Image (cartoon, rainbow, N blue to C red):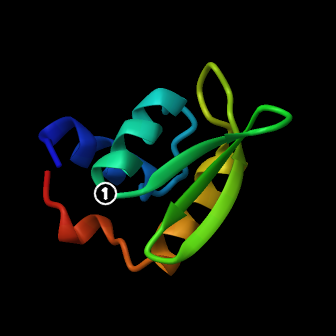
Amino acid sequence: MNHHHRKVLHAIFSHPVNANIDMKEIEHTLEALGAELETKSGSRLGISLNGHKIAVQHVNHSVPKEEVIQIRKFLETCGVAAADYPV
């Protein structure tokens, strides 16, 4: 995981919730963590990591706060913490 991926991961876990994260950056960070991404119907993106699965809305711009919170909770469920990846 490179420095840019770690910065995006910290942005996902930041408080208050960051609503200025590009979906492509999140996708690349998830792939660096070992996640498998799958395009679903209806502009949904399936993510599987460490035996857990989630589907989120795939957007071509900044990810809404609700989606960032959903991705954060998913990563916490998978055992990923920003503290494990210092910037």
Image x and y of residue 9, in percent: 34, 51
Residue at the top extreme of this rendering: 60
Tell which residue pokes out farthest to the right in this image. Answer: 42
Q: Is residue 68 above or below residue 72?
A: above
Pick the residue in front: 55 or 15. 55
Q: Is residue 55 left or right of residue 3?
A: right
Disc 1 marks which amino acid?
A: Leu
Name the foreground residue: 5 vs 33: 33
For the image shown, how many numbered marks are present on the structure? 1
Percent across and percent down for residue 65 are 66, 45
Q: Position of residue 87 (x, y in %)?
A: 14, 51
Residue carrying label 1: 33
Judge whether 22 appears above or below 31 on screen: above
The image quadrant that residue 5 belongs to is top left
Q: Taking 34 as reference, is 43 left or right?
A: right
Tell me if I can see residue 22 in this picture: no
Is 63 displayed left or right of 35 in the figure?
right
Mark 1 falls on what kind of element? Answer: loop
The answer to whether residue 74 is seen in the rendering is yes
Could you tell me which residue is drawn at 51 percent across and 77 percent down? 51
Looking at the image, which residue is at 55% across and 50% down?
17
Residue at 43% x, 75% y is 50
Between 74 and 16, the residue placed more toward the observer is: 74
Residue 80 at x, y percent in the picture: 36, 72
Q: Residue at 14% of width from left, 41% of height from top?
A: 3
19 in relation to 16, above or below: above
